[in-house]
Each structure stands twice: as C-alpha cells, then as structure tokens.
Image (spheres, rainbow, N blue to C red):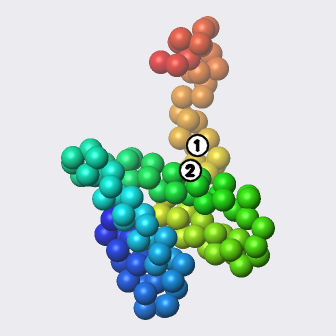
Amino acid sequence: MVDDIKARMTRARREKDDVARNVLGLALGEFQTAEARANRPLRDEETVAVVRKLLKSNEETLSLASEASGAEALRHEIEVLSALLPAAPSPEAIESAIAPVADAVRAAKSEGQAMG
C-alpha cells in the first residue's frame, strides 16, 4: 500500500492536486509513526486500519463542518482515502461464495452444526 500511496502522491503533485497530495502524505506519516511504535513494518491489515482511522476522522469532521469550501476539501480527502481501501465484496459475490454450503447450513439441527 505504501508504494501505491507514493505513486498516487506523485500523480497528485503532477496534477497539482494539493488536497490529495497532503492527505496521502498524512497517511504515509501515520504509517511511519505506527511502524516506529511497533518497531517493525506494518502488516497489510494494519495499514488498512490506519487508513480507516483517517477516513473516520475526516467523516466526523465533515459532519461538523459549516464552511462550504472546507467541506468540499474534506469530501475530496474522503474520496482519496476511500480509494486506498480494498473493495468490499458485493452481496452477489457473497451469495455465490456460500451457495455450495447453503443447503447444509439450512439442514443443520443446531447453530454449532451450522457454523462448522
């Protein structure tokens, strides 16, 4: 994810997108801080957690923002950060993944049997 963010920062710099460049730089700084605290490189799920934390913070700030231009910048930051997160599976993908065991789950006599 770090390499992806660096590439996006370069693209944002070329496109003169200061908001994207700044929020991506902030994400990199948060990664470096978390790595220093853990005294090891971050795992993928930890980098996703850092991005989710930044995203949540921006969403909370947006809900309190009253200035239109500030709100627009926050929306753009949220868009940039959201693009870094892995895509959630669609309901159709989940349905097709559990289809092979759906009958066995329905036929289970108790929750324990249904869960495995």
Rendering coords of residue 52 (x, y %): 51, 52
Q: How many marks?
A: 2
Rounded to the nearest angstrom, the CA distance separating label 2 from label 1 is 7 Å
In the image, what residue type sits under mark 1?
Answer: Ile
- Of the two numbered discs 2 and 1 in the rendering, the one whose residue sits closer to the viewer: 2
In the image, what residue type sits under mark 2?
Answer: Pro
Rendering coords of residue 62 (x, y %): 69, 62
Q: Left or right: 114 with respect to 62?
A: left
Q: Which image quarter: residue 58?
A: bottom right
Q: Is residue 86 visible?
A: no
Q: Left or right: 76 with respect to 3?
A: right
Q: Which image quarter: residue 78?
A: bottom right
Residue 89 vs residue 93, the one in the foreground: 89
The residue at the point 43 percent across, 87 percent down is: 13
Tell me the number on the disc at residue 116: none
The residue at the point 64 percent across, 20 percent down is: 106
Look at mark 2 in the image and give the residue it sits on. 89
Asked which secondary structure carries label 2, the reply is loop
Tell me the number on the disc at residue 94: 1
Label 2 close to label 1 by CB (< 8 Å): yes
